[in-house]
Amino acid sequence: QVQLVQSGGGLVQPGGALTLSCAGSGLTLEYHAIGWFRQAPGKEREGISCITTSGKVPYNLDSVKGRFTISRDRAANLVWLQMNSLQPDDTGIYYCATVACGKNGPGKLIEGYWGQGTQVTVSS
């Protein structure tokens, strides 16, 4: 069964850090552009960042620039999202997905794969 399996997330205080991972199961991630999305309560899902098959990062959401970093671990078949200086507005459910990745952000694919989602809560 082909799927993306997420781990990480949880509760962190403002200013703290978390790392999310997205692992390919039955899917070799280096052959796919991967994006991260988040959905805050009562809001639409938004694209945060994406990484191309060559490892380029053409897009980061303005509000996360300088704080979030997307990267690949090809040997481990993983994509990471390192999140630093977290703020309450970063609270939401985070998803990874196979995407079309360009300067306008991660684009959803008709037949893309999605992770199961992981909750990130930033609160004191």
Image (cartoon, grey):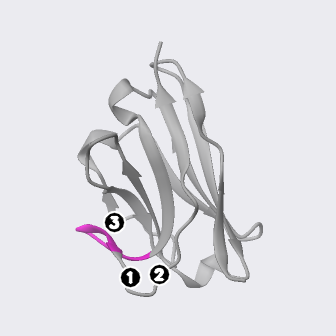
- What residue does disc 2 label? 112
Kind of residue indicated by mark 1: Leu
Circle 2 SS class: loop
- Identify whether 24 is placed above or below 93: below
Q: What's the residue at 51%, 18% (across, down)?
A: 13
What secondary structure is the stretch in magenta mostly built from?
A: strand
How packed mark 2 is, by other alpha carbons closer than 10 Å (few <14, some 14-19, many 20 or more), is: some
Q: Secondary structure at mark 3?
A: loop
**Can you identify the residue that label 3 sits on?**
58
Asked whether the residues under the numbered discs 2 and 1 touch, taking CB atoms below 8 Å apart as contact, a structural biologist would say yes
**Amino acid at dot 3:** Pro
Q: Residue at x 33, y 66 (%)?
A: 58
Quarter of the N terminus within the rendering: bottom right
User: Residue 105's spot in the image, x, y percent?
Assistant: 29, 66
Give yes or no for residue 86 being in the magenta stretch: no
Residue for badge 1? 109
